[in-house]
Image: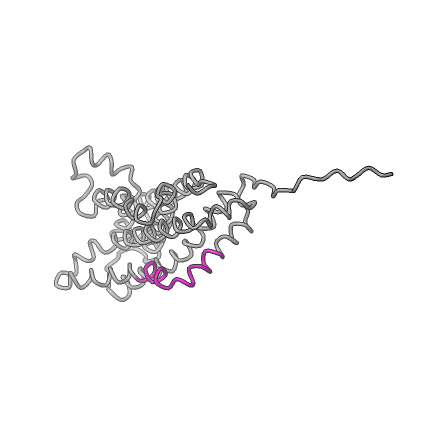
Amino acid sequence: MTAPATPTAPTTPAPPTGALNLSRTTATAARVLRQLRHDPRTIALMILIPCVMLFLLRYVFDGNPRTFDNIGASLLGIFPLITMFLVTSIATLRERTSGTLERLLALPLGKGDLIAGYALAFGTLAIIQSALATGLAVWFLDLDVTGSPWLLLLVALLDALLGTALGLFVSAFASSEFQAVQFMPAVIFPQLLLCGLFTPRDAMHPALEAVSDVLPMSYAVDGMNEVLKHTDMTATFVRDILIVGGCALLVLALGAATLRRRTA
């Protein structure tokens, strides 16, 4: 007589490794893009609003085009950062409160894969957004740029990616879409006031100038101004884009570290 078979414990998915997996990342990005495809209002907000704001700004200063030349390049980087921050933080929080993130993280999907997938999806839209805004400003609104428009596009794209990273990060600390919007005065407005858009940073109070030196938007504006004033790529411009890009990567890493596997 044979002994009864010993019941085996149900198998569970293998935990994800710490390294990023390309297939899991791209699958996450494809899922996010499929969802966004069915939300035309969100796509319009991300892609069209910066263009509309630049268009309005140009004709607000219709009697003084030099003013638009002086601030248009800076705002070309600021507008994408703000819109990507808003849309990314709200969209990510919506997935968390609906339980989608919790179900995804129950699969063999690492936090890094998830954050990288979201960044890749929103980054794809950021490329389109930055290209349209840069083309509109330079070739239709006659923004007077001494350097290459491609360098403007590079800074605008990095700013949009930074906004995406900040949105992903702050969504971890909000429990509702209203709270996500409330982070904007805390995260974006101080940078907007201290980035050098309204007055040169070296003309500020020394304490405020020191604070502005550690804010990434300051280097985004500085990078735009370098393109505005110099025909060639300068060492200062390279420093600025490296800082903005490095801040985006750092914030994405922090977003992955603070991502909870369970919805509160």
Out of 54 and 7, give the one closest to the viewer. Answer: 7
Q: Position of residue 94 (x, y in %)?
A: 39, 51
Residue located 79% across and 39% down the image: 4
Split into 4 quadrants, where in the image is the C terminus?
top left
Looking at the picture, how far across and down is residue 152, in whole percent?
A: 32, 55
The residue located at (42%, 56%) in the rendering is 124
Q: Residue at x 49, y 56 (%)?
A: 31
Residue extending farthest to the bottom is 140
Residue lying furthest right: 1
> In the rendered image of this protein, does residue 32 appear above or below residue 170?
below
Determine the residue positioned at 18% across, 43% down.
200
Q: Quadrant of the N terminus?
A: top right
| Residue 41 sits inside the magenta stretch | yes
The chief SS type of the magenta part is helix
Residue 174 in the figure: left or right of residue 207 = right
Q: Quadrant of residue 48?
A: bottom left
Q: Give the colour scheme of this rendering.
A: one colour
Front-most of 56 and 143?
56
Residue at the extreme left: 63
Q: Could you tell whether 206 is left or right of 181 in the image?
A: left
| Residue range of the region highlighted in magenta in the rendering | 31-48
Q: Is residue 186 above or below residue 57?
A: above
